Amino acid sequence: MAENLIYALIYCNILLLAVVVLLFGSIIIIRSSKKSKFDNKDFFLKKVTKSLNRYLIATTEQDELEEVEFDDFQLKKIKKSLYTNNRKDYTTTHLLSLKKELFGEMDEALDHAYTYLSLHEHSLKKTKSIDHSIRVQGFQELSIFKSKLGLSPILKHVNSRNLMLRQEAQVALVKLSTREPLSFFRKLVFDITDWEKLLLYSELTATEFKHATNFEQYLNSPFDGVNSFIIRLCTLFKKIETMRTIRHLLKTETSTMVIVAGLIAIREMGDERDITLTKDLMLKHDNDRIKIEGLKTLGSVEDPNNLDFITSYLEDPNLQVQFCAMYALNEITFEVGHYLQAKEAVLSEAHDLMISHIQNPLN
Amino acid sequence: MPFDIKLLICEDNEALSSLMRFKLLRAGFKECFIAEDGKKAKELLDEQTFDLIITDIHMPYSSGLELTTYIRKELKLDTPIIILSSESIEGTVLTGFELGINDFLPKPFSPNELIIRVKKLLKL
């Protein structure tokens, strides 16, 4: 009897367990099928697009209080439905695709929507992802929507050993920093590469702040790449007020990269007092690149007092240096062939070819 | 005040075309069709008449300039055309005007400005 009771109890327990498992299992299946239906991208985006368009148009046509409340209502509707990462990604992508096409009030409305919908939190999470390409997505999203919360997490990657993360972090910081887009230069532990210089330059020319930025403050960097890049930026954006600092730097500098950038700056922004500095640099550094830039600079000044100095470089072992000297002579004399003939200079066959090319460039 | 006007938007960016359509309908234009590529645009143009066409330059199948040539040379229509483009290269703009576009709006643009230009071309 007792034995039968025990068996009955065990049997009941097993039945009960089976019922509980079935119940929970069905709940999970129903919930996941519900989610998968509503996570369908097209279905979700259709709903979001309707509300978002209403919000965007109403925001840029506002004046009435009712319309402002209407805006919030539309965004609230969207926010309630953003309970999966996929949906957050779809919405962010949708906002990004509008962001690149629109400007003005609409652009500001998109930034507001991004923050209101807490999509910046989703982007911040991405910056901690194991997958580097997702981290980069996070940087790009935060910087495009100008979310200042991204500054700190992105700054951590400015010295990353991973080249992609480092480059993308630098570009994102230029987009995000409203006053000093290159302030992260003070935190660098590696020098910047030529590709990074190109990316940064491209980004700076797209910002509104290139003319207000004080580049000079970064000229005391321990890295030659940074210093040469800053000098090039000063030249390109015609920061003539930085020439004093550049001259001072060139007097003690030993890096070819920096001296070459300095000589280009002299050519574009310098004055008569820089001619002596140019000649000194050419004599001090027996480097072909420095000689070439120096000769270009002397040629652009068109001062006949430099003719003898330039002529001496026709004997340089490097043909390119010789050609630059020939070109510079032509810039000053306009007829380098006649000038050298008058000087009874001994010319080689290469010199004759150079003269012919300079005076008849189409041949 | 509603305008009995039929517009065609040729734009492959779905988010943007949807927003433009919403804006134009809200501005009072009666009908607004969307073509997401040059092929669909030509099909719609073959079937219906439009009062104004807004087209992007870069689209699948046919560019905005090719579409303009199709409208002006093959369909022989003088429907006003506005081109939207992210490249404001002088050559592209001039080519567009030579082919017969009526206005050029560089991207990024303001939808409010688009409405003003549409109304101006349609003399509303």
Image (cartoon, rainbow, N blue to C red):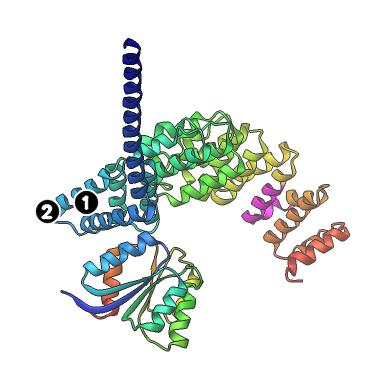
At horizontal 25% and vertical 54% (from top left) the residue drawn is A51
Q: Report the quarter where the C terminus of chain B lies.
A: bottom left
Residue B6 lies, with reference to residue A115, above or below; the image says below
| Residue A294 among magenta residues | yes
Q: Which mark is residue A66?
A: 2
**Pointer 1 local density, CA inside 10 Å: few below 14, some 14–19, many at least 20:** some
Question: Toward which corner of the image does residue A124 lie, by quadrant?
Answer: top left
Residue found 14% across the figure and 56% down from its top: A63
Instruction: Sort mark 2 into few (<14), some (14-19) or many (20+) by Cα contacts within 10 Å.
Output: few
Mark 1 or mark 2: name the one nearer the start of the chain: 2
How far is mark 1 from mark 2, CA to CA?
12 Å
Amino acid on which the number 1 mark rests in the picture? Gln
Viewer-side residue, A22 vs A261: A22
Q: Which residue is mark 1?
A: A74
Quarter containing the N terminus of chain B: bottom left
Using the image as rendered, state which of residue A96 and residue A264 is in the foreground: A96
> Compared with residue B5, is residue A206 higher up or lower down, i.e. above or below?
above
List x then y, in percent, for residue A276: 64, 42
Residue A188 seen in the figure: yes
Which image quadrant for residue A362? bottom right
User: Left of A358 or right of it: where is A347?
Assistant: right
Q: Residue A46: x and y, percent? A: 32, 57
Question: Could you say where residue A280 lies in the image, as x and y percent from the top left?
Answer: 68, 39
Magenta span covers which residues? A292-307
Q: Secondary structure at mark 1?
A: helix
Is the C-beta separation of discs 1 and 2 under 8 Å? Answer: no
Could you tell me which chain the residue with mark 1 belongs to?
A: A
Give the residue furthest to the bottom: B76
Residue A254 percent location from the top left of the image:
66, 33
